[in-house]
Amino acid sequence: MTPVLSLPAIPVLVLAAVFILIAVRQVGGFHLRIWQIMCIGAVAVLLFGQISPIDALRAINPDVMVFLLGMFIVGEALEQSGYLDTIAFRIFARARSGRQFILIVLLFMGALSALLMNDTIAIIATPVVISYACRFGLDPKRALLALCFAVTTGSVASPIGNPQNLLIATYSGISQPFIVFFLYLAIPTLVNLLVAYLFLTHDLPGKECDPTRDGKEYGVRDQRLASISRLSLAIILALIAVRVLTGPALIPLSFIALAGAVPVVLLSRQRSAIVRAIDWPTLAFFAAMFVLMQSVYNTGFFQSGIDFGAITSLPLVLGTSVVLSQFISNVPFVALFLPLIAREGMSVASLMALAAGSTIAGNLTILGAASNVIIIENAERRGYTLTFWEFLRVGLPLTAVNVTVYGIFLSLV
């Protein structure tokens, strides 16, 4: 008897089930978190024999895991020391209304994401944004959306803004990638950040307030840990500067994050508490995602169903990048897409469309960008969350406008 379902389709069905569970987040009386759902998916493909344990371990990208671990340690030290509150006070004290707060989140966090990579800002900024949203009397869900859109959109304009941009810059061999990304993507990125502001504030009152009456309230709580945190930040920024000047080959991202975490681990008296408090569930999510996505990749489902060689025009590159990044995530999609189309040849504008589309996909759904997951997992640890539908309700029309803006601008340059 011919089987109804061939084995290679099982990982694709598991991926679909993971998407449904993330959308529903409820099974009977159990409320499931995103990392738990992704881990269930990874365990399922292992149990069904769709990927061997050895191949599953090989699928987990050690550079990404070490990078996140290092940045989680630095971010936790910044938060526990109170130094993060001090920085936030200096930034957000300028705001006098909820509208101004949202604008600062979008522009400032967007700019930082272009410099320090969006996942890094997602790690550090989530608790601060939640805290200040409450002080402004804003719904934290709106502030979390602003942060998600800021770190996603802001990272588009830089080759080090996110992992997929870095992959495009290095694989394609673009000369002077920082200049190219800036010239092609900076203006439409700024426009899209302002569009996000309009989406998020159209129904907000313009009432002014002063939520930061006393700066002493937001001072450093642990001077020694704050000094160590500042040293960690200085190391990270210095290594990023060296990386920008010398290229990615000399200093990998994992080394930058690990070097930043070393002072906290070696010098802090709270090292054990900091390591215990970091966001281990998000690390579990990433490990599980690598395993599940590798098993899906191994089926050849997406490779055989799409003629990648025919996808060279700007609208097709943008549209395909946004849609497929929802299913196999933007970094795996770019890693899959680049080799398959390299032989066809792509213009610089098409490469920039690939960078914009695969990144802006994070504004459509929670799973469109890893930074969304980091933000929501961090928020859930503090009693707040965003559901799949709450994100999609704003993200769908916003992404449609984002794609239009990038498409029009890239067709003109």
Image (cartoon, rainbow, N blue to C red):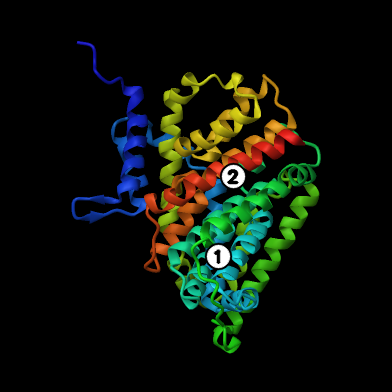
Question: Given the image, on which type of amino acid does mark 2 rest?
Answer: Asn
Q: Nearer the viewer, mark 1 or mark 2?
A: 2
| Residue drawn 60% across the image and 51% down it | 153
* Marker disc for residue 124: 1
Tell me if 15 is positioned left or right of 88 in this view: left
Q: Is residue 89 above or below residue 194?
A: below
* Quadrant in the rendering for residue 110: bottom right
Say whether residue 367 is left or right of residue 228: left
Name above or below for residue 167 compared with residue 79.
Answer: above
Q: Position of residue 165 (x, y in %)?
A: 65, 42
For badge 1, the amino acid type reads: Ile
- Check the image and name the residue furthest to the top: 1
**Disc 2: which residue:** 402
Estimate how packed mark 1 is, as few (under 14), some (14 to 19) or many (20 or more) residues with alpha carbons within 10 Å. many
Name the one closer to the observer, 29 or 250.
29
Q: Is residue 126 left or right of residue 291?
A: right
The image quadrant where one finds the N terminus is top left
Q: Which sits in the foreground, 394 or 359? A: 394
Nearer-N-terminus badge (1/2):
1
